[in-house]
């Protein structure tokens, strides 16, 4: 994919955990798509410290998957370009199946795409307690 002339390190920082098979497949497809995008677009020129980092953090039923790079970043997108291509649609669809949200940050220091699954259970507020009484 990248050839011998462009060395790019791939680092993985993952918590131990288990998921059901259909979730594992979706997470694997998301990681593959995001890493391939970084390989294709983040480093158009040779960079000595080029790196892609895959991070997977777990806390009970919540998890966060992030794929980041220290590449060139995305240029500012016009409104018509924000929809993205097939890969972006694939990541969005898979995240939706996982009940997760996708956030992307990009600047001249690189790009980070984070997929977060959070099961937030709020305590009732005082107003909700008064209404219930």
Image (tube, grey):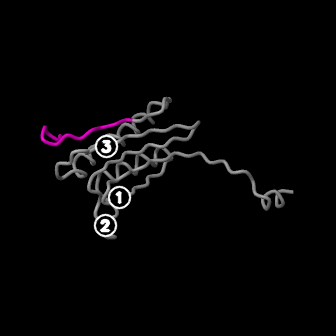
Residue designated by label 3:
52
- Range of the magenta residues? 1-12
State if disc 3 and disc 1 touch (CB < 8 Å): no
- Report the residue that reaches farthest toward the front: 48
Which percent across, then down, holds residue 126? 80, 59
Dividing the picture into quadrants, the one containing residue 13 is top left
Label 1 CA crowd tier, 10 Å (few <14, some 14–19, many 20+): some
* 3D distance between C-alphas at marks 1 and 2: 11 Å
Query: Is 36 included in the stretch rendered in magenta?
Result: no
- Report the residue that reaches farthest toward the bottom: 79
Residue 17 located left or right of residue 68: right
Which percent across, then down, holds residue 111? 34, 53
Residue designated by label 1:
106
Residue found at x 31% / y 70%:
78
- Report the residue that reaches farthest toward the right: 133
Residue designated by label 2:
77
Residue found at x 50% / y 30%:
17
Q: In front of the other: label 1 or label 2?
A: 1
Mark closer to the chain start, 1 or 3: 3
- Quarter containing the N terminus: top left
In this rendering, the answer to whether 14 lies above or below 100 is above
* 3D distance between C-alphas at marks 2 and 3: 22 Å
Which percent across, then down, holds residue 79? 34, 70
Nearer to me, 51 or 98: 51
């Amino acid at each position: 994919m990248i050839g011998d002339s462009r060395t790019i390190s791939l680092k993985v920082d993952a918590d131990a955990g288990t998921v059901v098979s259909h979730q594992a497949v979706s997470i694997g497809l998301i990681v593959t798509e995001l890493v391939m995008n970084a390989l294709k677009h983040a480093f158009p020129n040779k960079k000595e410290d080029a790196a892609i980092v895959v991070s997977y953090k777990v806390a009970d039923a919540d998890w966060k998957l992030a794929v980041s790079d220290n590449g060139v970043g995305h240029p500012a997108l016009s409104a018509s370009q924000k929809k993205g291509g097939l890969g972006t649609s694939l990541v969005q669809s898979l995240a939706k199946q996982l009940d997760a949200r996708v956030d992307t940050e990009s600047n001249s220091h690189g790009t980070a795409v984070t997929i977060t699954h959070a099961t937030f259970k709020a305590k009732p507020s005082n107003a909700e307690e008064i209404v219930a009484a």
